[in-house]
Amino acid sequence: MGTMKKRLLNLLLISVLTGSALAACSNNNNDPKESADPAATTDSSQAPAETTAFSDISPTIRGNKTPTQEQMDEVNNTLNDTYLGDLYDEKIPSHYDAYPYKKDVTLDVWLPADSQIPDMNNQVVQKQVEKLTGIKVNFITPPVGQEADAFTLMMSSGELPDIVIEPERYPGGLEAGVKDGAYLDLTDYMDKFAPNYSEWRNSDELRRKTTVTDSGKLLGFYSIAPYSEWMWFGMLIKKEALEKTGLEVPTTMEEWHTFLTKAKEVGYSEPLNYGSTYGQIFTGIINGAYGVWDWTFMDADGKVQWGPAQPQAKDYLATMQQWNKEGLLNKDWATADFNQRMASAISDKTAAMMDSPDTMWSYWKQQNNIDFVGALNPVLNAGDKAASTYKNFKRTGRSAAITTQADDVEAAMRWLDFAYSKKGWEILNYGEYGKVHLVDETGKPYFQLDSYIYKDPDGQPVATTLVKYRMHSWPDIRDEHNSNPLIVAEGSYSGDIRKYWTENTDTSVAMPPITFTTEEASREAELGNQLSTLRGEYFAKIIKGQLPVDAYDKFLSEAKKMGLDEFLSIHQAALDRYNAR
Amino acid sequence: MRTGQIIKKDVRKNWFVYLLAVPVIAWFVIFCYGPMWGLLIAFKDFKPLLGFSNSDWVGLKHFIDFFEGPYFWRVVKNTLLLNVWGLAFGFTAPIILALMLNEIRDGKFKKLVQTITYMPHFISLVVVCGMIHIFTADEGVITQLLQLITGKDYTSLLGYSNFFRPIYTFSDIWQTIGWSSIIYLAAMSSIDSTLYEAADMDGIGRLKKMWHITLPQISPVIIILFIFAVGGIMASSYEKIILLYNPLTYDRADVIASYVYRRGLREASLSYSTAVGLISALVNFALLWVTNKIASRKSEVSLW
């Protein structure tokens, strides 16, 4: 071709290459664009929040299945919360005096990006909160996957935003962050500037204890729930497996053995999917029957003990080694990754899984129409109560801290505090009224069948809409049981299974969320890593049959030599401090 | 002429070339030598917010923590051995491939083989590890092949610690052999063909030609690349290890980087990982220096 054409072609190729290289450099600090969402910008009915009492609109809103635009505006654009009921033992606070905030403030909030939310500054819930509180927010999100580096850089540069979400990223946790001057100690400001949060956390002993430090300081805003959330992990059995074997759901280890052996006979070649490389083999489900918990637990005297060192460990290991030899476990339990494990699960090899019902709802039921039931953790003797070291202490989800460089500390606290008000609870968990949720006769918000969460106008699945139209994990009053669309969807029984497990499991051995001092933390990490490596190796090899059960004695002596006692004493000290809070 | 005068003359004549080199030199100074003082955080309890000067000095604490750990010798041994395997097999394989490709006369076939062998280079590591998981699974292709050959029964191969090094090394070779052979082929293409003609006249066979002509002619390239390879012996990219290992294979697969990674999951300590990295770098440098010394003695080729 002619030289001119060749030149043009070369130029084009070079610009394409350069363009694609530069495209990768674009950062995520987009300027907050104006949202084009019409519902959010209806201006006519933006009544400024008055400190006087609102008119009670519950008769018109509660039970209303087809609200008018005017009713929706009244609910979405004002701080009126009279239609919301008091659903929990403790009342959700309703302090709105501070809104709309007296000054014109824009807060810089740093948070890790959610790959499902392209731009947090345009997320509908956040925009609604902005409108109701009168506080503008600029979200700063690092590119997905680079949060750790971005956080370290932010700290090193010394230029901090006003608020940091997931402040525990600071090495040593929140306490270290406050000590080093990154975050503010909020203890003196809490009652004054965060009335909703203070009232909510103080209304329950667990909420109070898990949100204060050992020394009695209040350092951040935590995601705290009205109830202990259900267990989310346990034994799940395919319904057809029960039918084919003709057996009941097993409860004792012996019954489980009978069930699994029978399952193998009727065609499930690897009846129990026991684990994978991401650590499922130690989840307390089976080993708990022997008291050989995965890690630390609290014994009957309230003392910290280490599961792998318990007296019945050899029995547990011998049983599992036997089961492995009999071919009752999936052959690749030590090496399978997530995809291999799910592939086994939906094949005819597996009859039972140790996993989360929410996950299996998707893989078993939704994708392959396999029904399943939940079984309680096995016990040794008939009549024993199933136990678990998993317990939700009413505090889960993301938290927030205010940095020492916040210009307007009150504004930052007021903005965070809104999430703990009744209105905040409604919007953050249930999204916008009308399009996303309605309110029933008792004043309880719920997702209607044609809610945007289930029928997204953009056609996105529930896994995406649950973060698109609501806040899934946020420093707020977390209402997972009632507002997670996956749990409350019609026909979904994963929530029922989780509820059944939680109500029938003894969690007195569960350790509360203790914290270590900076001096202890380093030593704990060192010892913890060593003990975890030791246990992982020995237990896996024994169960696999590569080592005899008696190798356990060597394991125990090595663990003691490594410093097991020192490890336990560090944990005990932390537990004592927690109890004294 | 004194050195200064020689340099001045050269700069005046070839100023453009020197100008091109300036950004490169600047990059090394700013990003490699400049930050080197930061290694000192290995001796401190570094907290990013406090900055360097305000963080506590802890001396050799991190180093002692690392040395005294019960797994120290094991992870060091595994790191070294894994890299020795890499050197023994992974370094020689591309050379052998290049030698073989060099003998092919058919241009089309040669190009085909080259393209096929260097395509795996572009596959992401995570995908390769996913493939390894599938191929070495219970019913995986490689597992079944092994059972066929040895007549013994095997379950998932990643569960046997003595298979870890072969799997790791040979999947590495599969991925990099084509790409690495390019540089050797390039070196071979610049060999004076009269040497081969002279050998033909003497009636020397193919293999002998490879041994006496080709290899010696590309030996400078081999030696330089070998010195580089030795310089990396105490390092290991931990991503592949973490994707392939599991508690059953810790005793062979757990290397320094993966051990420190698990430690970092419990307590992110920049100082600790810097300390460990510093030790590895020092050992690497020592070995590099020794290898270079030997190379400069035995041949005329060396890095410095």
Image (spheres, rainbow, N blue to C red):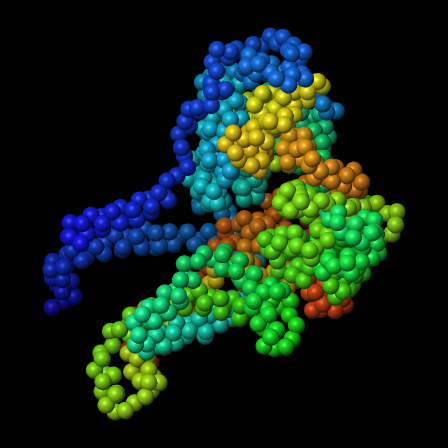
Q: Position of residue A29 (x, y in %)?
A: 41, 34
- In the picture, measured across the screen, residue B206 lies left or right of residue A497, that is left
Q: Is residue B246 above or below residue B267?
A: below
- Where's the N terminus of chain A, which quadrant? bottom left
Along the line of sight, which residue is nearer the eye, A69 or A113?
A69
Going 31% across and 44% down the picture, which residue do you hit? A19
- In the picture, measured across the screen, residue A127 lies left or right of residue A332, that is left
Going 22% across and 49% down the picture, which residue do you hit? A9
Q: Is residue A162 visible?
A: no
Q: Position of residue A563 (x, y in %)?
A: 68, 58
Going 28% across and 78% down the picture, which residue do you hit? B217
Q: Is residue A347 above or below residue A27?
A: below
Image label count: 0
Q: Position of residue B97 (x, y in %)?
A: 38, 74
Going 80% across and 54% down the picture, which residue do you hit? A245
Q: Quadrant of residue A316?
A: bottom right
Q: Position of residue A452 (x, y in %)?
A: 56, 28
Q: Is residue A301 visible?
A: yes
Along the line of sight, which residue is nearer the eye, A90 or B113?
B113
- Where's the C terminus of chain A, which quadrant? top right
- In the picture, measured across the screen, residue A178 lies left or right of residue A273, that is left
Residue at the far bottom in the pictured view: B202
Q: Quadrant of residue A500?
A: top right
Q: Is residue A507 above or below residue A6?
A: above
